[in-house]
Image (spheres, grey):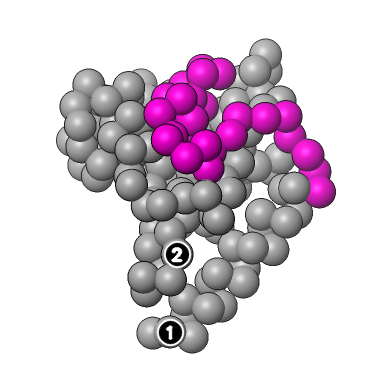
Amino acid sequence: MKIITVDPEKCTGCRLCELACSLKNTGEFNPARARIQVIGFDEMFTLSVMCFQCEKPYCAEVCPASAIIRDEVSGIVRVLKERCTGCKICTLACPFGNVVVDSQEKVAVKCELCDGEPECVLFCPTRALEFREVDTALIRKKIALSEKLKEVYEGVK
């Protein structure tokens, strides 16, 4: 399976990934409805964050409506909108905050990799985003990075 990876040294915070994502998924340029978010850390650096397509997706495990599933063919963790009740339990379960409830549709949304052709990757001008095969060592590094960022962010508050 492939996932989107981010090189924080290349990310300029231009937010084109958010615009490309929102246009592809909602038909409008609205970063608030994007499945990828650019997060700034006190003007030190920016980072694009999206669903990691977890091996064990907690969002799916806690969903009372069984609206979040792993596609058996592609391996992509998907939200079945017709089943979603908008209860937000999945948003609490995601350790990375990468599942949100869309303000207009009132259902859970998350990165579903644009069915294998992520728009954010196509439009990233610095190539900070890449779509590549899963590397379990890389996943562990991402988790470790997110934990460090969480510690730094909490220390800044």
Q: Which residue lies at the image location 53% right of the left edge and 78% below the top edge?
A: 152
Q: Which residue is mark 1?
A: 156
Mark 2 neighbour class, 10 Å CA radius: few under 14, some 14 to 19, many 20 or more: some
Tell us which disc is closer to us: 2 or 1.
Answer: 2
Q: Nearer the viewer, residue 139 or 55?
A: 139
Q: Is residue 27 left or right of residue 42?
A: left
What mark, if any, has residue 70 been given in the picture? none
Name the quadrant containing residue 20. top left
Q: Is residue 67 left or right of residue 84?
A: right
Amino acid found under the numbered disc labelled 1: Val
Which span is picked out in magenta? 110-137
Q: Which quadrant, please, contains the N terminus?
A: top right
Residue lying farthest to the right in this orientation? 137
Q: Nearer the viewer, residue 87 or 30?
A: 30
Q: Nearer the viewer, residue 82 or 79?
A: 79
Q: Is residue 25 above or below residue 13?
A: above
Rendering coords of residue 95 (x, y %): 55, 58
Mark 1 neighbour class, 10 Å CA radius: few under 14, some 14 to 19, many 20 or more: few
Q: Which quadrant, please, contains the C terminus?
A: bottom left
Residue 132 colored magenta?
yes
